[in-house]
Amino acid sequence: MRMKTLALGIALGLAAVSLAAAQEPVCQVNGTVLGKDRKGLPGLTVAAIMETGGVIYGTSTDEDGHYALKGLKAGSYSVVVVLPGNLVSRKDAIRLRPLFRSIVDFNLTSDAPGSSLPAITPVAAPPPDAEQAAGGRAEASISVTCALSGTDRAPTPDATLVLTPVEGAGRRRQGRTDSAGMCVVSDVPPGDYHMSVRAPGFITWSLGPAAMKEPGSLKVTLLLVPFPMNFEGTLEDKLVPADPIPPATP
């Protein structure tokens, strides 16, 4: 009996080690976006863009200006906050390591905003096989896969992902998430796009203009933040204006 118990314990231990080895280590980045008077700003888009390409993680700030991105792959990222008027405050070369939580805060009164996003590069598409080559050159396009969930990690169905060409050059693409919170938008020509996600009861997530110049595949993983309902006014009242109004001339 003792030998059987020992053997069972060893088997369970080996199974646990095997399962742990099969799971890819993930990282986490948290932070706060502050505006004037060092108060948190709600409803701002935050994105972690992997510098090697292929993956965007995104969310919005909550009613206190906090954000959290979980389940990121290890690597080097640009973390950006999108301001009204499509200005961007960004911090580059943020190195994320497994089992550590990285803190990336933004103080919009001291962090000078830039005017553009870092490059968003899809993972290169595999070369066409012999059958495709015989039938003609495959169209160079981008496939965007989107996984949406709430901050409780529950999938968000019936949300809409919209890719709008900058300055209306081309056709708008969109997809709707299924019961698992997933959608795929295929055959997107390389170019500059505004990317937005809308879901009832959640803050709209909007990134753009985003330059996606190379054909391939891009994965977007979003944690949608519930629309804060316990403060007065609107989100716009709490945001830093894109073009501050100068004082009146005496």
Image (cartoon, rainbow, N blue to C red):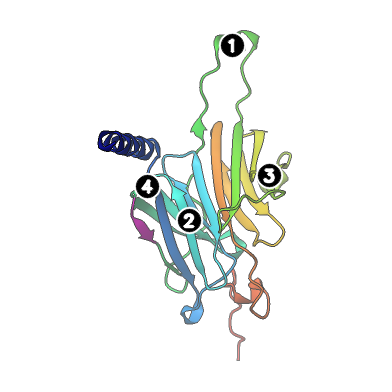
Discs 2, 3 touching: Cβ within 8 Å: no
Please tell me which of labels 3 and 1 falls first in the chain: 1
Q: CA distance from mark 1 to mark 2?
A: 41 Å
Locate the N terminus and report the quarter of the image it occupies. top left
Q: Secondary structure at mark 2?
A: strand
Q: Nearer the viewer, residue 65 or 8?
A: 8
User: Which residue was labeled with disc 2?
Assistant: 69
Q: Which residues are magenta?
A: 99-103
Specify whether residue 102 is painted magenta: yes
Q: Say whether marks 3 and 1 touch (CB < 8 Å).
A: no
Counting every numbered tag in the picture gives 4
The tag earlier along the polypeptide, 2 or 3, is 2
Dominant secondary structure of the residues highlighted in magenta in the image: strand
Q: Most extreme residue toward the bottom, as rendered?
A: 250
Q: Which mark is residue 179?
A: 3
Mark pair 3, 1: CA separation = 37 Å
Depth order, front residue of 161/216: 161
Q: CA distance from mark 3 to mark 4?
A: 32 Å
Quadrant of the drawing holding the C terminus: bottom right
User: Horizontally, is 92 left or right of 147 in the view?
Assistant: left
Q: Residues within 10 Å of mark 1 (few under 14, many from 20)?
A: few
Give, as a three-letter code, the residue at label 2: Leu
- Quarter of the image where one finds residue 202: bottom right
Q: Residue furthest front?
A: 1
Give the residue at mark 4.
76
Residue 33 image point, x, y percent: 48, 69
For marks 4 and 1, the one nearer the N-term is 4
- Report the residue at 42% width, 57% height from top: 29
